[in-house]
Image (cartoon, rainbow, N blue to C red):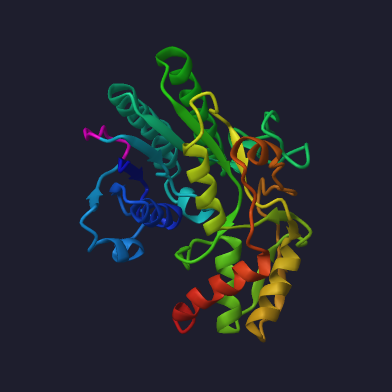
Amino acid sequence: MSKRILVTGGAGFLGSHLCERLLAAGNDVLCVDNYFTGTKQNVVACLDNPRFELMRHDVTFPLYVEVDEIYNLACPASPIHYQRDPVQTTKTSVHGAINMLGLAKRLKTRIFQASTSEVYGDPSVHPQTEDYWGHVNPIGPRACYDEGKRCAETLFFDYLRQHNVAIKVMRIFNTYGPRMNEDDGRVVSNFIIRALRGQPIEIYGTGTQTRSFCYVDDLIEGTQKFMKTSDEVTGPINVGNPTECSILELAETIVRITRSSSKIVFLSASQDDPKQRRPDISLAKARLGWEPRVGLEEGLEKTIAYFRQFASG
């Protein structure tokens, strides 16, 4: 049956892909965004769909609407953006969670929280399983995002215990694909833009630090499978690609695919930058029947094709 679905952060990278997927399934979608990092251009393909509604709104303020499901994706996710206004970043995670959980409580609806692998910080356990509590610097420059998301998880589970709100908490690992902001500083978009322009590709540290990169289509499929599970499946559940890749290997792969003349240069390491990041997705496989299908090179080729329009900038 068709549902009325609220997507906060719906004009962002992940949110716009989610809106398209929900519309394709025949749902009515209310996309809410304050355009701090999201853009109308990301959802331009949805605007002519009569089932789509776009609203400018900041989730740090209450929202009074009538919907059947809520996806809470609102929060800047790249260090450049979330460190630009760290107090607002924390407010978005914490006040935003309170406001959306309050709405879910009033409407008695299911609510999805886009949490993050950053709740694990710089992990001492590898790969990361959901029962690992993390290793986070609570006063560092990344704390506004890391601790904000950790607090949001606390609120979600307290609303479950205290008010019996039906929650779904997903810990999203590094995701990439079309509609990433070209200037968000994330490693995939940054490397691709520099490679296409023939500029030096800058690696902070030695490049031996690892990440696991999940293509956006796989990630969105995971969110859909999660939301269709029974109320007993609350999460948190890791969703990401368990194939590990060093930052240097990523840079070399992008240079090769783009046939770029870019040189790789090494700069001082960033503070609190995790040395390793790879999800254990055993729980996602068991509870959701989900695992990624798009390999890194296939996903990079699609992403590079998208970014070529910005290469001359």
User: In which quadrant is the C terminus drawn?
Assistant: bottom left
Q: Is residue 313 above or below residue 20?
A: below
Instruction: Kindly tell me whether residue 30 is visible in this rendering.
Output: no
Is residue 266 within the magenta segment? no
Q: Judge left or right: residue 165 versus residue 187.
A: left
Residue 13 spot, x, y in % from top left: 44, 57
Residue drawn at the location 52% of the way across and 42% of the way down: 225
Of residue 225 and residue 92, the one placed in the foreground of this image is 225
Q: Is residue 42 above or below residue 274?
A: below
Is residue 63 within the magenta segment? yes
The secondary structure that dominates the magenta segment is loop
Residue drawn at the location 71% of the way across and 50% of the way down: 242
Residue drawn at the location 66% of the way across and 39% of the way down: 121
Residues shaded magenta = 59-66
Count numbered badges in the picture: 0
Of residue 56 and residue 222, the one placed in the foreground of this image is 222
Q: Kindly indicate the quadrant of the structure image that contains residue 235.
A: top right
Residue 118 spot, x, y in % from top left: 60, 42
User: In which quadrant is the N terminus drawn?
Assistant: top left
Q: Judge left or right: residue 45 versus residue 226.
A: left
Of residue 197 and residue 296, the one placed in the foreground of this image is 296
Residue drawn at the location 70% of the way across and 60% of the way down: 268
Residue 220 spot, x, y in % from top left: 50, 51
Q: Is residue 80 above or below residue 152?
A: below
